[in-house]
Amino acid sequence: MTDHRNPKAEYSPIGEREPIYLPDGARLAVWVVVNVEVWDFRSPLPRTLLPYPQGEPVVPDVANYSWFDYGLRVGIWRLKDALDQRGIRATMSMNGVLCEAYPRVVTECVASDWELMGHNYIQQVMSKEADERAAIRKTKQLLEAASGKPMRGWMGPGLSETEATLDLLAEEGIEYVADWVNDDLPYRLNTAGGTLHALPYSLEINDIVLHLVQQRPSPELFERTRDQFDTLYEESADGARVMCVAVHPYVSGAAHRIKYFRQIFDYMRQHEGVVFMTGEEILDWHLQA
């Protein structure tokens, strides 16, 4: 019989697990991931908002590049201000080249004690890397030099992996990945290279999917996040849950969306037992639970 199960993770229904609990009586951990990419001005862009004239790709693509670049010039600062004002530290999923091309973004986020999570050296799926290990190592080196701390987490561009990626990450000392969106709690992955855990990331509480793929209106960022939060908060009465909010500066940092991003956290902070944690904090709690 063909086995279609996931070879990287043991199947475990959440309701059959022994409950685990957050410190100090907290029940729901919220993980904010700000994804900061670097796009090449001289190459076709990975995402477009404005269709190409006559359907022909153009390089440089001024309209779509500048749409993305708005996120680095304006959007990231709106997101950062919203989080700083509420005392929330994010995990920044970032291309390693961000340290070289836009060092001011990195230094300011490090100053706010954000965690830096690797997102490949350039914005390219892992299957296109001629040497995955070299790309992981280069990203790790740059992020650790920028933060002065170990780079413990990784997310593949587009959540991409090859058959070898998880083994290589574990061998290179990475401790968690955010590519797997199949649980509301961290869990251990099966690798040949060492211990590696999956942390709950999200495709649906994610502004790329919500606004660019599904083309939902700006208020739905708050509405959908609120509804997800309400369910997980209710379930967390019987054991901890983790919720991820994933955004990009050129999407949620837009002027017509930023108020909904702020509303998310104002709503969450009205509830007892909600804690905001970085990826490495969630991992450390899980390992000790």
Image: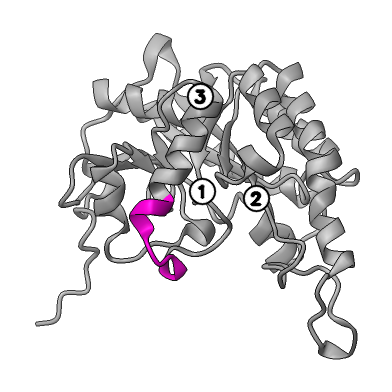
- Is the residue 145 above or below the residue 195 in the image? above
The residue segment tinted magenta is 127-135
Residue 75 badge: none
- The kind of residue tagged 2 is Glu
Residue at image x 84%, y 78%?
A: 51
Asked if the residues shown at circle 2 and circle 1 are in contact, with their CB atoms under 8 angstroms apart, the answer is yes
Q: Locate residue 179, reporting x and y percent.
A: 43, 53
Q: Nearer the viewer, residue 113 or 173?
A: 173
Q: Nearer the viewer, mark 3 or mark 2?
A: 2
Quadrant assignment, res 129 = bottom left
Would you name the residue on which mark 3 appears? 277
**Earlier sequence position, callout 2 versus callout 1:** 2
The tag earlier along the polypeptide, 3 or 2, is 2
In this view, the residue farthest toward the left is 1
Residue where numbered disc 2 is placed: 37
Disc 3 and disc 2: Cα gap in Å?
22 Å
Give the mark, 3 or 1, whose residue is nearer the N terminus: 1
